Image: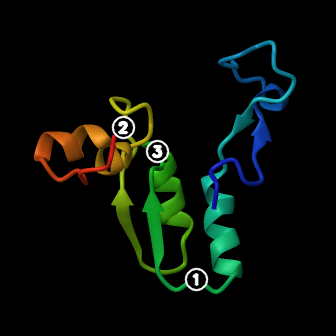
Amino acid sequence: VCCKNCSFAKKELGLKQVKPELEHEAMCNPKFQAKFLADKGVELFISCGLCVGHDALFNAACPGPVTTLVVKDRLLAHNPLGAIYSRYWKRKLGIMDENEV
């Protein structure tokens, strides 16, 4: 479930926006993510790339077991799996196909 699923507008809550010129800058809703999944009958909740704090809210709102697959990081522009599938590491480890650029 995308973190912006059933999001709130930061302006509605009087919060500072990163881009004030935007009419709607979404704020994540980790409790709704958990509810959405629970309503779909999920039995094992897997967290992938949630912000610190949002992960705690998500975990607390899940009615079943939760595990974290991937954490968010700023080094890779919030794309922690980018290092796994990038050509940089394939090239560095010598595992690129011959015809791969």
Q: Which residue is mark 1?
A: 42
Looking at numbered disc 2 in the image, what kind of residue is underneath it? Asp
Which quarter of the figure has residue 97? bottom left
Compared with 27, 6 (above or below) is below
Q: CA distance from mark 1 to mark 2?
A: 26 Å
Other-residue count near label 3 (Cα within 10 Å), few / some / many at <14 / 14–19 / ≥20:
few
Query: What's under tag 3, amino acid-wise?
Result: Gly
| Chain-order first, disc 3 or disc 1 | 1
Cα separation between marks 3 and 1: 22 Å
Colouring scheme applied when the structure was drawn: rainbow
Residue 39: image quadrant is bottom right
User: Which mark, by number, is residue 30?
Assistant: none
Q: Which residue is mark 3?
A: 53
Label located before the other in sequence (2 or 3) = 3
Q: Nearer the viewer, residue 101 or 65?
A: 101
Q: Type of residue at label 1?
A: Val
In this rendering, the label closer to the viewer, 1 or 2: 2
For image coordinates 61% across by 67% down, the residue present is 34
Q: Tell me the element at label 1.
A: loop
For marks 1 and 2, the one nearer the N-term is: 1
Q: Residues within 10 Å of mark 2 (few under 14, many from 20)?
A: some
Q: Name the outermost residue toward the front.
A: 99
**Alpha carbon separation for disc pair 2 and 3:** 13 Å
Residue at x 43% of width, y 31% of height: 77
Q: Secondary structure at mark 3?
A: loop
Q: Which residue is mark 2?
A: 73
| Residue 91 as seen in the image, left or right of residue 83 | left
Residue displayed at 83% across by 29% down: 24
The reply to whether discs 1 and 2 touch (Cβ–Cβ < 8 Å) is no
Find residue 31 and report its horizontal and vertical position in percent.
63, 59
